[in-house]
Image (cartoon, rainbow, N blue to C red):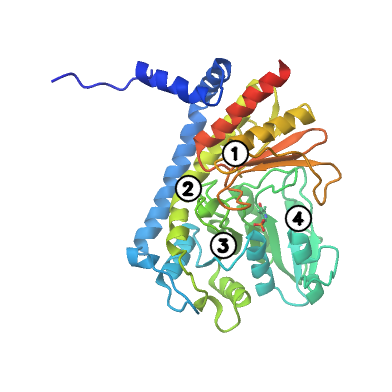
Amino acid sequence: MSNPEIISAEPLAAEAEEAKKIYAAYELSDETLSLATEVEDRLQAVFRRHDRLAELNQFKVLDAFRKEYLAETDFAGSTGYGYGDSGRDKLERIYARVMGAEAALVRQQISSGTHAIATALFGILRPGDELLSITGTPYDTLHDVIGIEGPNGLGSLADFGITYRELPLVSGEIDFKTIAGPEGLKPNTKMVILQRSRGYANRPSLTIDAIQRAAELIHKQKPDCIVFVDNCYGEFVELREPTQVGVDLIAGSLIKNPGGGLAPTGGYVVGRQDLVDLAAARLTAPGVGSEIGASLNLNRTLIQGFYLAPRTVSDCLKGLDFAAAYFESVGLKTNPGSGELRRDLIQMMHFESAEQLTTFCQAVQAASPVDSFVTPVPGPMPGYDVDVIMAAGAFVQGSSIELSADGPLREPYMAFMQGGLVYANIKLAVLLAAEKLRSLEA
Ligand SMILES: *Cc1c(COP(=O)(O)O)cnc(C)c1O
């Protein structure tokens, strides 16, 4: 018998030959590739950290699956009213368990993150109540929901006599001092809202520790005040979710982190049972609440997506760390910097010209699994006074757990790179971009 082949760090000659051919299909130069290897070597400790995050979150998810006795029969869907849909109900209990909460509403009938958040706000707030944001101005799509500038005739909270106030972040941090003072919680402040991820704002994303401190302070000042977190884009980025550290209710989108890239649509509201019930009454109708809502054929996909989500998020974190480290090593400014703790799945890169920014976005498009043959060009966008370039080639329209890149064509020529289901795909986008940027310089 011949000796068994032992794996070594160096690829076998035949593998190296094959690798050359595969890279050649993308016209990647030796310079680009050897820098990639150096960058990956430097990132080993960071990658180990993300692997461990994935492992622990995976154990949490599997523990919830077994405690709920997830079975093949749960994948059968329901039609019509959707009464007694065991898969849908188990998925909700699984979400609640993993997020350390009493209850969950996880539905394809929730059309987006904004819809999930609006369902919670309208379900709970009543005329005369005040909603207070303590992380500055909320995500853009919530402005019309809240009626930030007063009644807008669109059926906003303001139209129903629910008032709104906001406290800005101070140097990127929650203003604990003001919250504790006379300008903090008022007698009619029924709910405080926090946004975990930075969204489109130039601010740091919140850590779970900061969210915990805020929830404790608010409950100490006013025990009946509801602490709500817009959890969009934050799921599985840390080991705990806001509902595990004193937050009453959270909401998010299934075409972001918790859908694991598989969920084709949907949203969730998770937290205290009484509050989830109110959100369910708003989503369907008072009296029927979460009892109705057919899952059709989606139970398996939504459950499998949640199963894949910890690893998807961790692959994405690794890919963004690779992007940050690679572009830093060719002299670009990045935010967060490589090795900095990440609290969401957004990477900013400062390019030096409109041409560089455009080239980068075109490379991301070329590396996408879908529409790789399309060349994005800068164009006008509502809300922007300059042209914007956007790249995305996703399986699910608008999914931000999938790889995308965009940026307005003005100084400081900042690209926002987001998501990515598979590390190797994010890496390919970075390498294609690096190659193209190199040839711009030449
Ligand atoms: C994505 C997102 C939302 C909701 O957006 P939708 O496009 O409606 O899903 C809200 N807040 C934050 C921070 C987000 O990232």
To which residue does mark 2 refer?
310
Viewer-side label of 3, 2? 3
Say whether disc 4 or disc 1 marks the residue closer to the N-terminus.
Answer: 4
To which residue does mark 4 refer?
140
Element type at marker 3?
loop
Q: Residues within 10 Å of mark 4 (few under 14, many from 20)?
A: few
In the image, residue 238 sits, relative to residue 99, either above or below, namely: above
Drawn side of residue 374 relative to residue 291, left or right: right
Residue 294 position, x and y percent, is 50, 73
Q: Please, which residue is most extreme toward the bottom here? A: 287
Q: Is residue 223 visible?
A: no
For badge 1, the amino acid type reads Ser
Callout 3 touching callout 1 (CB < 8 Å) = no
Element type at marker 4?
loop
Element type at marker 1?
loop
Image quadrant, ligand 1 = bottom right
To which residue does mark 3 refer?
266
The one of 301 and 250 positioned closer to us in this rendering: 301
State yes or no: Cβ of the residue under disc 4 lies below 8 Å from any atom of ligand 1: no
To which residue does mark 1 refer?
372
Drawn side of residue 82 relative to residue 329, left or right: left
Residue 440 position, x and y percent, is 72, 21
Q: What is the distance, in whole Å, between disc 3 and disc 2 at their CAs?
A: 18 Å
